[in-house]
Image (cartoon, grey):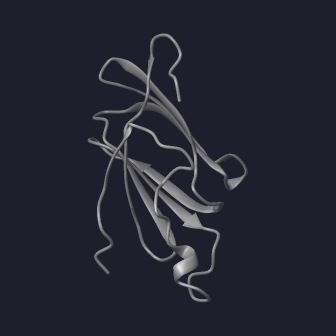
Amino acid sequence: MAAAAGVSVAPFQWAQLNDYVLVKVPLQDAKDVSITIPEGKSLHVKCVAEGKTYEHNLPLYADVIPEESSNVTRARQIEIKLKKKVDASVDEDASFWPRLATTSSSSITSRWPDSS
């Protein structure tokens, strides 16, 4: 996603569990945080941190359930927990996401393994 003039693209780090995708936005002292999940198909993050405005609209690899997803803003990062729409108890392989987004993005800096 190309950022508008004066707007930086928010960086993402992610991991997954069978039922959830966990996303971190490592921005310190984020303010005016707005996180939306339009129709469960994309993740839109907007905030102000480190004297800059950050925004990113990321088309997700698969659908999520917005009503069962959550987020919290901490001093050093924004944490987002996305509930996968696929029922992992029926087919665990169907719940695996090989990547966070439908498209490649240099702002997705890392992925950590599922430790369960």
Q: Farthest residue to the right: give it.
A: 39
Quarter of the image for the C terminus: give it. Answer: bottom left
Classify 73 as above or below 65.
above
Classify 96 as above or below 102.
below
Which residue: 33% across, 17% down? 51
Classify residue 18 as left or right of residue 68. Answer: left
**Closest to the observer: 15 or 48?**
15
Which residue: 58% across, 51% down? 60
Q: Can you give x and y, in whole percent of width and height, for residue 88 in the image?
A: 56, 82
Classify 92 as above or below 61.
below
Q: Farthest residue to the top: give it.
A: 5
Q: How many marks?
A: 0
Which residue: 56% across, 66% down? 83
**Closest to the observer: 10 or 66?**
10
Q: Quadrant of the rendered structure where residue 14 is?
A: bottom left
Classify 29 as above or below 52.
below
Q: Can you give x and y, in whole percent of width and height, for residue 111 in the image?
A: 32, 56
Q: Can you give x and y, in whole percent of width and height, for residue 42 in the image?
A: 62, 47
Q: Farthest residue to the bottom: give it.
A: 90
Q: Can you give x and y, in whole percent of width and height, for residue 37 in the image?
A: 63, 48
Q: Quadrant of the rendered structure where residue 76 is?
A: top left
Q: Quadrant of the rendered structure where residue 65 is?
A: bottom right
